[in-house]
């Protein structure tokens, strides 16, 4: 018989398949469907039907499962995301925007953003806590925008009155009247002292008029100071994006408790990868004074100190006293000022806190209140040649020069009963 080479059989088979495909394309009035299977081994029509059936059953099962579990499952939130969204839901209604005028609809974004001066949060039924920076930027009648917490109503703006402020800690208190019951929901108060570097914190604010914006970060430092302020310690440093619109709003821990009041991102209000917040322990003390009296009563020492550059040049540690108020707490305690060619007393410790500058004296008194009795360790400069009796004490201290003469120091312990001074807010 005739023997056909295998190669020829393959060629004939390929030609037949190609002819069959061209015939099918000619008979079809619409473009062929996109193949659902990748190129590869031949799959029969029956196998394709079985695979399609399995896919349909799988999709139907997934759809039924999601329908039974609700929209939360459809969003596929992780446990961490659920916790954060719940924190925001609970806290956001207590945070409000503060602006120069009521919110204006239908105006360009840039114009609307100019009206915004910051944020605040509910303290009690009538009072709102914010930053002094917000009050400085606002008019005599700032407006606060309160939201209903998701009840579907439009945000409502209320005129606010400035109750008072503390220029030192940079916090202020507003009062709003005639607010419907249920809208003013105070936030729980936490403890900044319990914070640890690395833990999560959250801020809710009103940047550029975008109300109820949430940002998240970590505590990146503790015990900071805001440049240009004195007497406020324990400032919280965070890496959250605290643009100026967050100023005055709350800094929250993971439980939703307020641990601080957000200050400007950096001096000047420019975000530079960090933010600062006044610790809530400081805020709570100041707010109580402002609400009760309209101002903060601060401890008064009644002494003026030399610039740090002067003491460093003289080689004197601590804060040197230049003058004392006649009849004031420092004078009554026996603190000696600079006079008659003699250097004044040098304070090296105040209320158990080491002092190495004049600012450190104020910082040491940050937690004191008027009427407190605090101890002071001072070095009293003495002329060694004039008072040889204290030669032994002077030799134990670093020397300084006073008009070319070697000066020693006598160490003394004094007690001073602090007086009171008031810091009031004046709105132009």
Image (cartoon, rainbow, N blue to C red):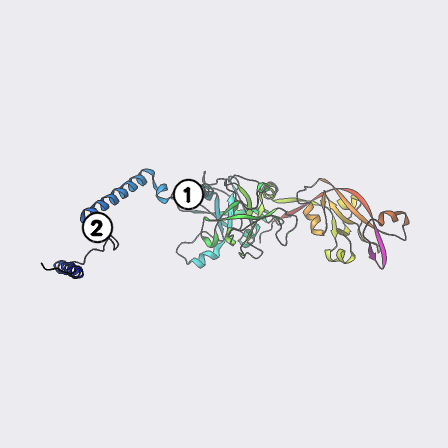
Give the structural element (helix, strand or loop) at label 1: loop
* 390 or 167, nearer to the observer: 390
Q: Is residue 53 visible?
A: yes
Instruction: Give the image quarter of residue 428.
Output: bottom right
Tell me the crowding category of disc 2: few under 14, some 14 to 19, or many 20 or more residues within 10 angstroms, Cα based. few
Tell me the crowding category of disc 1: few under 14, some 14 to 19, or many 20 or more residues within 10 angstroms, Cα based. few
Q: Work out whether 14 lies above or below 348.
A: below
**Rendering coords of residue 263 (x, y %):** 56, 50
Which of discs 2 and 1 lies nearer the camera? The answer is: 2
* 271 or 146, nearer to the observer: 271
Q: CA distance from mark 2 to mark 1?
A: 40 Å
Left or right: 324 as drawn, with respect to 78: right
**Rendering coords of residue 33 (x, y %):** 20, 55
> Residue 107 colored magenta?
no
- Which residue shows up at 19% across the image and 49% down it? 44
* 219 or 334, nearer to the observer: 219
**Rendering coords of residue 108 (x, y %):** 41, 59
Left or right: 11 as drawn, with respect to 206: left
Going by the picture, which residue comes out furthest to the front?
1
- Which residue shows up at 39% across the image and 56% down it? 106
Residue topped by disc 2: 43
Q: Earlier in the sequence, mark 2 or mark 1?
A: 2
> Residue 406 colored magenta?
yes
**Rendering coords of residue 41 (x, y %):** 24, 53
- Label ID, residue 288: none
* 205 or 288, nearer to the observer: 205
Residue topped by disc 1: 78
Give the structural element (helix, strand or loop) at label 2: loop
Which residues make up the magenta segment? 399-409
Dominant SS type (magenta)? strand
């Amino acid at each position: 018989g005739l023997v056909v080479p295998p190669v020829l059989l393959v060629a004939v088979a390929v030609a037949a398949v190609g002819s069959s495909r061209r015939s099918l394309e000619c008979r079809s009035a619409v473009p062929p469907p996109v193949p659902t299977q990748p190129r590869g081994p031949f799959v029969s029509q029956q196998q394709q039907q079985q695979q399609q059936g399995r896919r349909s059953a799988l999709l139907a099962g997934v759809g039924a499962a999601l329908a039974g579990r609700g929209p939360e499952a459809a969003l596929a939130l992780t446990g961490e995301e659920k916790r954060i969204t719940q924190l925001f839901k609970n806290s956001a209604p207590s945070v409000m925007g503060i602006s120069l005028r009521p919110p204006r609809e239908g105006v360009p974004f840039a114009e609307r953003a100019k009206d915004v001066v910051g944020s605040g949060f509910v303290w009690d039924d009538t009072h709102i806590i914010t930053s002094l920076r917000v009050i400085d930027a606002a008019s005599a009648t700032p407006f606060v925008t309160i939201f209903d917490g998701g009840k579907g109503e439009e945000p409502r703006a209320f005129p606010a009155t400035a109750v008072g402020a503390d220029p030192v800690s940079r916090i202020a208190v507003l009062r709003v009247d005639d607010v419907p019951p249920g809208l003013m929901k105070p936030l729980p108060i936490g403890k900044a002292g319990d914070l640890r570097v690395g833990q999560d914190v959250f801020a809710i604010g009103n940047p550029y008029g975008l109300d109820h914006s949430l940002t998240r970060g970590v505590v990146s430092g503790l015990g900071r100071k805001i440049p240009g302020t004195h007497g406020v310690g324990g400032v919280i440093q965070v890496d959250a994006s605290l643009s100026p619109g967050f100023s005055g709003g709350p800094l929250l821990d993971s439980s939703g408790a307020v641990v601080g009041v957000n200050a400007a991102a950096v001096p000047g209000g420019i975000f530079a990868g960090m933010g600062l917040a006044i610790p809530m322990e400081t805020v709570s003390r100041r707010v109580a004074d402002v609400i009760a009296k309209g101002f903060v009563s601060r401890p008064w020492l009644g002494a003026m100190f030399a610039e740090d550059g002067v003491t460093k040049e003289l080689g004197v540690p601590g804060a040197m006293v230049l003058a004392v108020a006649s009849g004031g707490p420092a004078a009554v305690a026996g603190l000696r000022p600079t006079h008659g060619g003699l250097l004044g007393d040098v304070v090296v410790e105040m209320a158990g806190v080491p002092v190495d500058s004049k600012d450190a004296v104020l910082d040491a008194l940050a937690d004191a209140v008027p009427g407190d009795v605090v101890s002071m360790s001072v070095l009293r400069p003495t002329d060694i040649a004039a008072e040889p009796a204290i030669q032994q004490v002077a030799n134990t201290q670093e020397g300084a020069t006073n008009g070319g003469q070697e000066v020693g120091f006598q160490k003394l312990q004094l007690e001073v009963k602090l007086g009171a001074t008031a810091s009031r807010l004046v709105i132009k």
